[in-house]
């Protein structure tokens, strides 16, 4: 799975940059992006990293768009990914939940499951392993550098810093002067407010940041589904296609 996701993401970057750059400014370059979950992150990232190629993006329940909520972990400030640490007791962090609030798996359980399947980000099924491979640098052993110790959960702050170029909120914030005129009014994000993997938290941080951007105003659209889990979508397929068509043909 890791190899498939890496191939998919980087192939899309390669084709977007190399095969479509000659079409910039032409009618053939009027394109939209959409996707959900990891596909939602990709849809938003493509719009942000290659703004000249797309008319708009509709990202649903995207993977973390602000690493202050990497699901429920602040990779920049938290000391440990698996536990909220206090003077008296370490409280396990949840990795997924039901809409009722019941915890399905903890961070420690999910990461240890990946580790049992394969070391060095080679679980083949693990989302956490995938993110290390996509967002971070290569480690000294040639495999993706660990954002945290897979056994203990201790976060490596040097690796966390290296993730910043892939933090979409931070990238937009740092580059708004050049990106703003190209993406303003073209970003649409939808997520359930009880997302199974807490992805609504990062989306809310992105919205708070976008509301402060000026010259131009972000004019981004954020939609939240009450009691919506990871599968929630604000539009039916015909409704979404209509919105995308209208964006392509204003």
Image: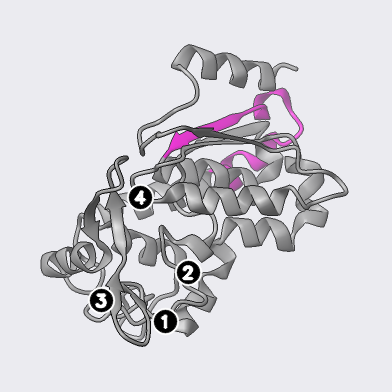
Number of the front mark, 3 or 2 = 2
| 22 in magenta | yes
The residue that label 1 is drawn on is 79
| 68 in magenta | no
Q: Earlier in the sequence, mark 1 or mark 3?
A: 1
| CA neighbours of label 2 inside 10 A, class few (<14), some (14 to 19), many (20+) | some
Image point (25%, 49%), residue name: 102
Q: Provide the residue span drawn in magenta.
A: 16-36
Q: Secondary structure at mark 4?
A: loop
The residue that label 3 is drawn on is 150
Asked whether, in this view, residue 108 is left or right of residue 30, the answer is left
Say whether residue 18 is visible. no
Image point (36%, 87%), residue name: 87
Number of the front mark, 1 or 3 = 1
Residue 115: image location, x then y, percent: 17, 70
How many angstroms separate mark 3 from mark 2 (CA)? 16 Å
- Looking at the image, the residue that sits furthest to the front is 88
Q: Quadrant of residue 2?
A: bottom left
Number of the front mark, 3 or 4 = 4
164 shown above or below 199: below
The residue that label 4 is drawn on is 197
The residue that label 2 is drawn on is 74
């Amino acid at each position: 799975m890791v190899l498939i996701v890496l191939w998919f993401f980087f192939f899309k970057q390669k084709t977007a940059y190399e095969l479509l750059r000659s079409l910039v400014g032409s009618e053939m370059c009027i394109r939209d992006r959409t996707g959900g979950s990891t596909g939602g992150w990709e849809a938003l990232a493509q719009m942000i990293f290659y703004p000249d190629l797309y008319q708009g993006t509709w990202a649903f329940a995207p993977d973390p768009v602000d690493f202050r909520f990497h699901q429920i972990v602040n990779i920049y400030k938290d000391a440990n990914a698996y536990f909220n640490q206090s003077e008296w007791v370490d409280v396990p962090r949840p990795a997924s939940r039901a809409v009722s609030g019941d915890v399905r798996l903890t961070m420690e359980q999910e990461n240890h499951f990946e580790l049992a399947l394969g070391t060095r980000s080679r679980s083949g099924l693990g989302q956490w392993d995938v993110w290390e491979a996509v967002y971070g640098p290569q480690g000294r052993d040639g495999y993706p550098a660990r954002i945290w110790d897979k056994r203990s959960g201790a976060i490596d702050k040097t690796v966390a810093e290296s993730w910043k170029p892939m933090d979409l909120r931070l990238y937009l914030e740092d580059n708004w002067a050049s990106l703003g005129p190209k993406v303003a009014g073209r970003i649409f994000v939808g997520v359930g407010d009880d997302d199974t993997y807490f992805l609504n938290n990062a989306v809310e941080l992105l919205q708070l940041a976008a509301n402060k951007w000026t010259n131009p105003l972000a004019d981004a659209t954020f939609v939240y589904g009450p009691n919506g889990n990871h599968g929630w979508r604000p539009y039916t397929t015909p409704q979404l296609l209509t919105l995308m068509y209208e964006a392509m043909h204003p």
